[in-house]
Image (cartoon, rainbow, N blue to C red):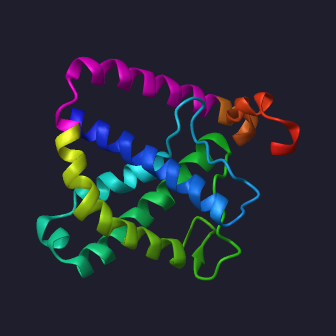
Amino acid sequence: MDRFFWQFFLYGLLGFVLECAFARLTHSPKPDRKCHLLLPVCPVYGLGALCILLLPPGVKASPLLLFLAGAGVATACEWGMSLFYEKLTGAVFWDYHALPFNLGGRVCLLFSLFWGLLALPMTYLIQPWLESWVGAIPAAVTIPFALFYLGDAAASLQILRLRGTQGLRWYRRFTPSEAR
C-alpha cells in the first residue's frame, strides 16, 4: 500500500510540474496550477498514473495498446476528477469547451492523446526508476507524510468549497503585483 501512495503522490507532483511548464509554454493566463493548499500536486495525474500502472502486463508490453489503454483510463480519471471537484466543491480546474471533440468540457480528444503519449515514457522510462526509489522509502516516513497529505487535501477541499480556486493561491500575497 505504501507503494501506491508514493506513486500517486510522486506522479501528482510530476503532473504539477508538467502543468506549470505547459502553462508557461502556452502563455496561459493561469500560469499556476495549484490543486492543494500547500503541496504542489495535481491528483488527476496521480490517479491517472495509478490506473495506467494497474493495466495488465500484456497491455503494457505493447506500445500501441499502452497508448490506447493509457489514453482511455487516464481520460476516465480526468472525467471523474472533474466531476468530483465540481460536484463536491463547485471548483472547475479545467474547461475544454473551446476545444473540438470535448465531452461536456471535462475531457477532449487532444488531451486524451496527450494522456496516451504520457503513458509511454511513464511506463517504460520513469516507472522502472521510480519503483526502486519508492521501495526504499521506510514506512516510518510514509505514515506521517500520508497523514499530512490527507490533511492538506481535506483543507484544500474545504477552501475550494468556500473560496474556489483563488483560495488556494495564498502565496500571491508575497509576489510583486505585476507578477499576479
Where's residue 117, x and y in %? 38, 72
What number of labels is visible?
0
| Rendered view: 22 above or below 10 | below
Outermost residue toward the left in this view: 58
Q: Horizontally, is 166 left or right of 40 in the view?
A: right
**Residue 69 quadrant:** bottom left
Q: Is residue 107 left or right of residue 9?
A: right
Can residue 180 be spotted in the picture?
Answer: no
Identified at 29% across, 24% down, the residue is 142
Q: Nearer the viewer, residue 81 or 18?
A: 18
Tell me which segment is drawn in magenta: 134-158
| Residue at 57% in and 29% down | 38
Q: Position of residue 26 (x, y in %)?
A: 67, 67
Q: Is residue 20 left or right of residue 137?
A: right
* The N terminus: image quadrant: top left
Instruction: Say which residue appears at 77% left-offset and 28% top-offset.
Output: 174
Quadrant of the rendered image containing residue 71 = bottom left
Image quadrant occupied by the C terminus: top right
Q: Nearer the viewer, residue 140 or 106?
A: 140
Give the residue at x 58% y 64%: 106
- Secondary structure predominantly adopted by residues drawn in magenta: helix
**Residue 82: image location, x then y, percent:** 56, 55
Instruction: Tell which of 126 and 71 is nearer to you.
Output: 126
Residue 98 shown in magenta: no
Residue 109 seen in render: yes
Question: Of 104 and 132, which appears nearest the observer?
Answer: 132
Q: Quadrant of residue 7?
A: top left
